[in-house]
Amino acid sequence: MARTEYYDDRAAPAPNSLVVSASAVVTNEGGEVFIQRRADSGLWALPGGGMEMDDSLQGTAVREVKEETGYDIEITGLIGTYIDPRHIIAYSDGEVRRQFNVCFRARLVGGEPQLSDESLEIRWVPKGRA
């Protein structure tokens, strides 16, 4: 499913949903940060996604990182909560969302890197370049 992101764009479609999501800034022992290139938009982003009804926010971040990258993480703190009415995400199935995101700090604890249907590329980058 394709995704188009709009920011402060008067041509953006009107939202028809609000989604709670979680993401994680994952660091390794070398202090690098993990990012992925999203399959739905081609943009580089932190791994994360929508919360399911039986999930906690921390559990959402852990699950999404595992699903999208193959890595196991441990949540170590809260970075912040983010919602911006100027940021609209439109999907090819007709969903047009605003997103409420909770971003966590996390560390790598295991797993093997692997691409999913949600990620085109994954990489570690120095903290100042993420």
Image (cartoon, rainbow, N blue to C red):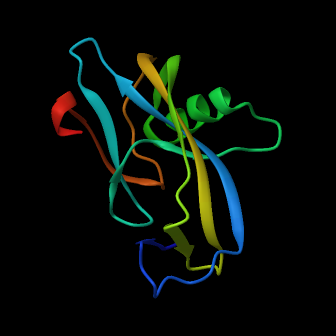
Q: Residue at x 64, y 35 (%)?
A: 60
Nearer to me, 18 or 27: 18
Residue 104 image offset from top left, x and y in percent: 51, 28
Q: Quadrant of residue 25?
A: top left
Nearer to me, 88 or 110: 88
- Residue sticking out furthest to the bottom: 11
Nearer to me, 111 or 91: 91
Q: Residue at x 29, y 29 (%)?
A: 33
Q: Residue at x 54, y 75 (%)?
A: 90
Residue 98 image offset from top left, x and y in percent: 61, 63
Q: Quadrant of residue 67?
A: top right
Tag count in the figure?
A: 0
Placement of 20 over or under 16, stated as above or below: above
Placement of 18 over or under 32, stated as above or below: below
The quarter in which the N terminus is drawn is: bottom right
Q: Quadrant of residue 10?
A: bottom left
Residue 51 image offset from top left, x and y in percent: 69, 44
Residue 14 image offset from top left, x and y in percent: 62, 81
The quarter in which the C terminus is drawn is: top left
Task: Judge left or right: residue 37 versus residue 6.
Answer: left
Q: Residue at x 52, y 69 (%)?
A: 88
